[in-house]
Amino acid sequence: MVRSPRDPRRQILELARVLLVDDDPTSRLTLQTVLEAGGYHVEGAASAAEAVGKLEGSEFELVLSDLHMESPEAGLKVLAHARMMDYKPATALIATYQDSPARTNSRKGNQAVLIESEDLPELLSKVAQLISERATRRVERELRHAGV
């Protein structure tokens, strides 16, 4: 039996959910547009407090946060809160300005990953990689709990 695209039994594609936190509306909306064009469901937050509320109310596969918002450490606080969530989203800092320091940490342990937004293909590649690594960790954790 061939199913038409309007068939309600057709499996719905679930997009990976990304929380994008940046107090600069232009940067946030630009990155949101790029990520949505890349196939992600993106929710924006303009402050650390708004981000924490969204983390508590929904599950995200990835949390991207600008470092400097209402305080110099606001982005790190968002990522720390995200890492405490039971659903364990992947996390990364995102630099949305050109004079950002060119430092990138690896995603080992609880270190932050710095993604610079000037190179859009690289941005989308790193986002996909972070979400993939999170999925792998989640499957491994479930297998350990199942005793496999």
Image (tube, grey):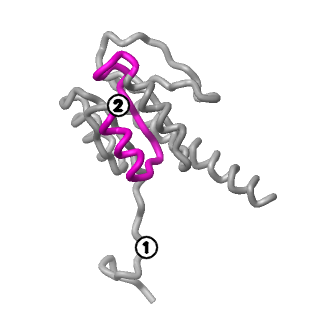
Task: Tell me where the magenta segment starts and ends, as one range.
Answer: 48-73
How far apart marks 1 and 2 lie (CA) works out to 30 Å
Q: Quadrant of the N terminus?
A: bottom left
At horizontal 43% and vertical 38% (from top left) the residue drawn is 63
Q: Are marks 1 and 2 in contact (CB under 8 Å)?
A: no
Residue 53, percent from left and from top: 35, 44
- In the displayed structure, does residue 81 sit left or right of residue 117? right
What residue sits right under mark 2 in the picture? 120
- How crowded pointer 1 is (Cα within 10 Å; few <14, some 14-19, many 20+) is rated as few
What residue sits right under mark 1 in the picture? 11
Report whether residue 48 is seen: yes
Residue 71, percent from left and from top: 32, 18
Report the front residue among 2 and 104: 104
Residue 56 colored magenta?
Answer: yes
Question: Which callout, 1 or 2, points at the residue further toward the start of the chain?
Answer: 1
Report the front residue among 83 and 123: 83
Nearest to the eye among marks 1 and 2: give it.
1
At horizontal 62% and vertical 50% (from top left) the residue drawn is 138
Q: Quadrant of residue 94?
A: top left
Amino acid bearing label 2: Leu
Residue 144 colored magenta?
Answer: no
Q: Give above or below for 142 relative to 137.
A: below
Report the front residue among 42 and 12: 42
Q: Quadrant of the C terminus?
A: bottom right
